[in-house]
Amino acid sequence: MMTLKWIDLHCPVCESVFESMAASANDEAGQDFYIDPSTPASIAIAVLPFLVHVCPRCGYVGSVADFGDEVEITDDVRARVQAELAPHLGTSVRIPWLALTVAGSDKYDGAARIAEWRGDDARRVAELWVRAAWCCVDEGDVEAERYYARHAARWLANALDSFGEFDENEQTTMAYRLGELWLRIGDTRQANAWFERAGRSS
C-alpha cells in the first residue's frame, strides 16, 4: 500500500538539508518507490510527482538515491544547476508546503536535464523525459506532453542505437515504445516506422 511521508534529504549540490514528501510502499521512509507494471496507469501517474524531490535552495532534482551521501556532483553540473534550475525550481519551493504544488512535469524536466549533464545512460534519461510527459497527461497540458515526448523519443532512439547492450526482446520493446511516443506526439509516419521495426525484430 502506498503512503506519503515527509523525509529529510541532504542536497549534494548546495549542502542544504530539507524535507520533502515521498511515496513509500513500506515503513522504510526514504526508500525509492517502485511502480509495478500491473499498477493502473492513473495510480502510477498520480504517484510520479512524489518519486522525485527538489532542493528548495538550488533546484537540484532527483530520486531519493540521487540525494545519497555517495552521490558525487562535478563542478560543471553544480554550476548548471545553480544557473539553470535554481532560478526556476529553487524559488518555487522556498516555502515548504509549496513543494507540494511544484508540477511533476517540472520536477522530471529538471531531473532529466541533470541526468543529461551527468552523462547518465540514454535509457535512464529517456525514462525521465517519459515520466515528464506522463505527468503532463495528469496536468492536462497536451503541448508540454508532446514537447517532453519528443525529448524522450530522441533519447530512447539513442539508447536503441547502442543495441549491443540489449537483447532482441528489449530492442523490440524499445522500438514499440518509440512508436507509442510518436503516436502521442501526433506523427503517424514516425510511429508506423517504429512499429514496423518492432515487428521486424520480434
Image (cartoon, helix red, strand yellow):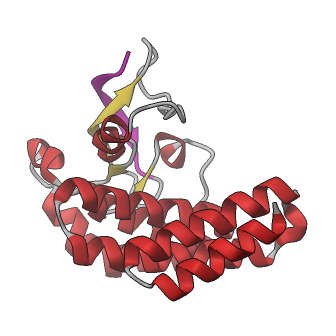
Is residue 53 shown to the viewer in this render? yes
Tell me the magenta residue range.
Answer: 1-11
Q: Is residue 2 magenta?
A: yes
- Residue 51: quarter of image: top left
Q: Position of residue 176 (x, y in %)?
A: 63, 64
In this rendering, is residue 111 above or below 113? above
For the C terminus, the quadrant is bottom right
- Residue 169: quarter of image: bottom right
Q: Which of 94/186 is in front?
A: 186
Is residue 75 shown to the viewer in this render? no
Residue plotted at (64% across, 82% down): 193
Residue plotted at (56% across, 67% down): 126
Residue plotted at (52% across, 49% down): 66
For the N terminus, the quadrant is top left
Q: Position of residue 48 (x, y in %)?
A: 35, 45
Drawn side of residue 13 relative to residue 107, left or right: right
Residue plotted at (81% across, 74% down): 162
- Residue 165: quarter of image: bottom right
Q: Which of 8/134 is in front?
A: 134
In this rendering, is residue 136 above or below 161? above
Q: Position of residue 109 (x, y in %)?
A: 37, 68
Q: Is residue 106 magenta?
A: no
Drawn side of residue 37 relative to residue 18, left or right: right
Residue sticking out furthest to the bottom = 189
In this rendering, is residue 147 above or below 199? below
